[in-house]
Amino acid sequence: MQTTEFLESNGALDNPEELKNRARRDGYLFFRGLLKEDALLTVRRHILELCQKAGWLEKGSDAMGGRAVPGVAYVEPQPEFMVVYDEVMKLESFHSLAHEPVILDICRKVFSEEVLIHARNIARIIFPQNTEFTTPSHQDYIYIQGTPDTYTAWIPLSDCPKELGGLSVMVGSHRAGIFKVRAALGAGGAGIDTENLPYSWTEGDYRLGDFILFHSMTVHKGLPNLTTSSMRLSVDYRYQGRSQPLVESSMQPHYGKLSWEEIYKGWKSTKFQYFWKDFKLNYVPFDRSPHDKVARERGVSYLEAIERERVAKAGGKMGEEG
């Protein structure tokens, strides 16, 4: 399948109609160097300090390099991972980054109305050499729902060349509706088959300060972190027009294990706490049928599927070595 380089949209920043046309046509907008490096590195440092405390980083190495201990790798929702992830969810810097004015300005132009930031912010901590859990090809809509015209901002917290495991999107795929899902490993636990889809992948090397906005129905996937020893850190923030429908879980903490009271405890500012409380939001029901289908197909819990994969991988290695 053909792969192309990202189309940069910096030149269209002052042309709202062009931004909207590109978003409608391609299902994504890619921008170079618009985000403040200091803010990104602050979030990176705070997350890696938690990883270091958990013993995930090589002793004696610079934490900001994110060098993982060889052989140590966890994925959501394993208990070992979630202990650290719960602490990430409490980071004021992580949640504040979603409110960056440059992102809101772009979204306001694309939506032609005031922007609603989803409160359910997501951090991605991807261990190296853990390719069986690379995020599979999927669409975000089955997880987000509400309005299809929700856009995700995918932001790497460092330079992210393709070999570190960036994000690839399928150009124009958002116009084809919702594809059938199947059970898969990797973030979300579900994927779609893309071999026969008539679209091309677009991807490239991200630099610190770059980000990509993509439609909730745009097919996308993670790239494998095959050759590095460093974790890939990135964040997902989601945006929609304020008048559009949404589901209640979009305004709840990711995974829902913590309350907002627990998350906000210890924050230095109240500026971004309950920022949506005075909005009149149009909540609609959440459709669980795609997720129920995947659960029936898998036949076991996702945690059990992860453990089976790890046992199979370990057995294969022992066989090779023996």
Image (cartoon, rainbow, N blue to C red):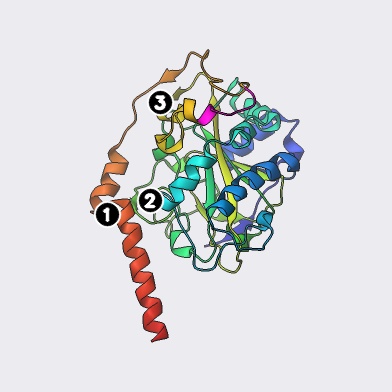
From what the image shows, is residue 136 above or below residue 139?
below
Q: Earlier in the sequence, mark 2 or mark 1?
A: 2
Residue for badge 1 = 298
Q: Are marks 2 and 3 in contact (CB under 8 Å)?
A: no
Residue 65 versus residue 267: which sits nearer the camera? 267
Visible residue check, residue 115: yes
Of helix, strand and loop, which one carries label 3? helix
Residue drawn at 59 percent across, 26 percent down: 111
Q: Earlier in the sequence, mark 2 or mark 3?
A: 2
At label 1, which amino acid type do we have?
Answer: Arg
List x then y, in percent, for residue 99: 63, 29
Marks 2/1 in contact by CB < 8 Å: the verdict is yes
| Mark carried by residue 244 | none
Query: Residue 263: horizontal and vertical position, in percent?
Result: 51, 31
Marks 2 and 3, how far apart at CA: 21 Å
Quarter of the image holding residue 17?
top right
Tell which of 20 and 272 is nearer to you. Answer: 272
**x and y, in percent, of residue 71 in the image:** 49, 68
Label 2, label 1: how far apart the Cα atoms are:
10 Å
Q: Amino acid under label 3?
A: Glu
Left/right placement of residue 116 relative to residue 64 reads: left
175 versus 227 height, above or below: above
Contact, mark 3 vs mark 1 (Cβ under 8 Å): no
For marks 3 and 1, the one nearer the N-term is 3
Look at mark 3 in the image and give the residue it sits on: 248
- Pointer 2: what residue? 189
